[in-house]
Amino acid sequence: MTEAVEKILANYAGESPGVVANLRRLLEHGRLGGTGKMVILPVDQGFEHGPARSFAPNPAGYDPRYHAQLALETGCAGYAAPLGFIEAIARDYAGRLPLILKVNNSDTLGGPDSPCSALTSSVQDALRLGCSAIGYTIYPGSTYRNRMYQDLRDLIREARSVGLPTIVWAYARGQMPKEAETALDVIAYSAHIACQLGAHIVKVKPPTDVIWQEAAKPHYEGIAHATLEERIRHVVQCCFEGKRIVIFSGGAAKGRQAVLDEIRAIAAGGGNGSIVGRNAFQRSPEEGAALLAEIMDIYAKA
Ligand code: FBP
């Protein structure tokens, strides 16, 4: 029990003991346990982007055990994946590593305009597999966003009733150009929607300095957003003034220095951590583990 974790959990005071217990499990597991920061390994890219695009750079990643073992050995707070990958490892890893069942997924074989993930598993699956949380993606900006919000409302209600917290991947996409998806106002708006929908933990991409919505532009004149650290601070503010845990994704594989610079800005801006997939599992086992260790070092000192 640490002050940092108690301070965060105080923001979830209205939750059931089961939800709080699982949030605590995530906040206290692994290398960053007790610091109030977390690094999660997400491996749904095989479904979302395709297996070769995801695992050819490091073919060990075709094996579901590879990721669970990487998350365990490096001291990640948790491991998030779709049903198949979790089922393949749950018997051996549940109880040793917090598992997060990603209950919806979409592929990239269809058109990009109206993305809508399918429900691919359930709260009951998460319980059966010993998971500590469920994960769900919303696409603000998609024609089907309202359906996703309503499905999420039902899922959060069901998960909460059995003591499971919900992590929401808030990804704007659909009726907008690519550069708008990571615009600061759009990321902050998406994160806020996720919080309003009842997300216990929100996951977004690091925002750029683009402001996309015309109506929002005048308001951003008074909001510092020149540096990534300032933009992170604004996203944290939009997550109920820091009262909801917000973590940032790693994105496509890039150089070590670029990853670490981004992590430093997230830590300095008050982000709660990272959810790093491709930058971890697309490197060789040694390099992936070393980079995760460096990332955790930065958060440990924040
Ligand atoms: P990465 O660190 O690989 O970006 O993983 C985080 C994540 O949220 C995954 O869970 C998801 O599959 C991926 O990003 C989606 O990325 P994109 O927006 O590029 O499709």
Image (cartoon, rainbow, N blue to C red):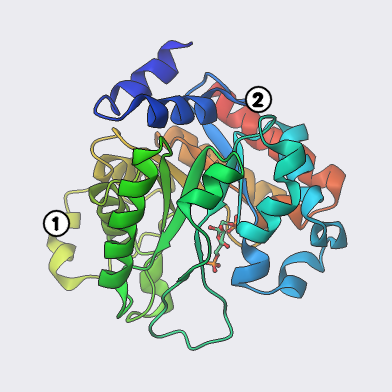
The residue to which callout 2 is attached is: 31
Residue at point 69%, 56% (across, down): 85
Q: Is residue 185 visible?
A: yes
- Left or right placement of residue 102 versus residue 115 in this view: right
Between 139 and 125, the residue placed more toward the observer is 125
Left or right of residue 93, residue 198 in this image:
left
Residue at the image position 54 percent from the left and 33 percent from the top: 38
Q: Position of residue 57 (x, y in %)?
A: 81, 65
Please name whichever residue, 215 or 226, is drawn nearer the observer in this view of the structure: 215
Q: Residues within 10 Å of mark 2 (few under 14, many from 20)?
A: many
Q: How many marks?
A: 2
Q: Amino acid at mark 1?
A: His
**Pointer 1 residue:** 219
3D distance between C-alphas at marks 2 and 1: 39 Å
Q: Residue 56: percent from the left, percent from the top?
A: 82, 69
Secondary structure under badge 1? helix
In the depicted structure, whether residue 191 falls above or below residue 18: below
The numbered mark, 2 or 1, whose residue comes first in the sequence reads 2
Quadrant of picture, ligand 1: bottom right
Q: Is residue 38 above or below residue 203?
A: above
Can residue 261 be seen here? The reply is no
